[in-house]
Image (tube, grey):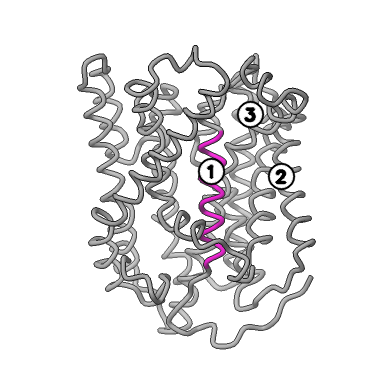
Amino acid sequence: MGCLQATGHTTGRFYRPELDVLRFFAFLLIFLFHIFPDGRDPRIDHLLKGLAPVFYATVPTGRYGLSLFFTLSSYLICELLLREREATGTIGVKQFYIRRILRIWPLYYLGLALGVAVALLPGGDHGDIAEIAWFACFMGSRYTALHGWTSNPIFPLWSISVEEQFYLFAPWIMKFFNRKSLCGLCATLIVVANARLYFLGTVAANDSYIWSDSLVHFECFAVGILLCLAVRSRVCRIAIWQRLLLIAAGWSCWLYACDCLHSNFEYASANPGSWSLMGGYALGALGASLMLLASLGTSPKLLPRRFIYLGRISYGLYVYHEFAIYITTRFILRQASRIEAPILLLKISIELGLTILMAALSYRFFETPFLKMKNRHEVIKSEPILDAGS
């Protein structure tokens, strides 16, 4: 394993297709975590037979797809802003916020509008509208911490609130902090996240409160920035077997966090305690960083073009996937809890296919105009050269 010094790293373009594939992988983890049963299920036992215990141990790690999203987001933001500072001598904070607004807000508020529509449908819960108001103010993470998960399909969007909180200070620290100061800030964020976890363990907070707490996820943002500082302006040469080893190590971190430290105790009887929480969330961030490191520098020849595309529409996949699950369960296969094992596979295929269809249409006809406006405010281009749709 080694790294080569990259040339021209301050040029006006930074695009790595392997990170799009990683985005799709992160979404897929979350999708599988949301659609598979929470406990033992005879249909799964019938389908997988002797492999069913492996499945039950692995599914909870899907929640760390979100940790991977956070880590990847901070890595990219750090890389792009530092390149902008090197190229221009400063960072345009106003331009940064314009770019983020054009990328995040249109689809985010469309998702919330769809959530309102679901609440107003026959059989919907009109009380969801008050919950959606919290999300509209980017307080979804706080609402979830206080009241638990909403039944409305918008519930995954609480994590956008955490992203927006990171964006509040990201351009400022990249503009004024040097490398040493950034490392010190990241160390501080990690300490703060673990202090928060220690406190939440002592008061026996429930899983939804802890998982939706913004401070605990700042550990992932800190790790992403540190990884950027460690490998930026270099192209890593990693053999395939080394990449596979890093992926296995990352997944092992997630498995140990869930199965041994019980950091994911949503369906367990009690909070596992401060030290288990601190260890579990640290392993979650470490696993995400290992997955990210494993992907960096992958030859484009090894990357399926379809996965690259799915990674480019991964924001839409994330926003729409619970709506696809809702549509499938309510209108296509209404007896979802009673269907046999073969139909379960069909149900999952329909949900994933519908998610991809909705995201693809959204990307082409709704998001693209906003992306074109966003690109006019970019200093460092982060899109494929031949991607006319963005």
The stretch drawn in magenta includes residue 302: no
| Amino acid type assigned to the residue bearing label 2 in the image | Trp
Picture layout, residue 236 above or below residue 355: below
Q: Which residue is mark 3?
A: 264
The label number, if any, that marks residue 251 in the structure image: 2
Answer with the quarter of the image where residue 313 lies: bottom left
- Cα separation between marks 1 and 3: 18 Å
Q: Which residue corresponds to the image point at 43% horizontal and 49% vertical from the top-left?
A: 163
Q: Which residues are magenta?
A: 17-32
Within-10-Å neighbours for mark 2: few <14, some 14–19, many 20+: many
Q: Which of labels 1 and 3 is toward the front? A: 1
Q: Which residue corresponds to the image point at 64% horizontal and 27% vertical from the top-left?
A: 201
The stretch drawn in magenta includes residue 20: yes
Asked whether 284 or 319 is in front, the reply is 319
Per the image, label 2 sits on a secondary structure element best described as: helix
Mark 2 / mark 1, whichever is N-terminal: 1
Within-10-Å neighbours for mark 3: few <14, some 14–19, many 20+: many
Q: Residue 241: horizontal and vertical position, in percent? A: 79, 61
Q: Quadrant of the N terminus?
A: bottom right
Q: Which residue corresponds to the image point at 77% horizontal and 68% vertical from the top-left?
A: 239
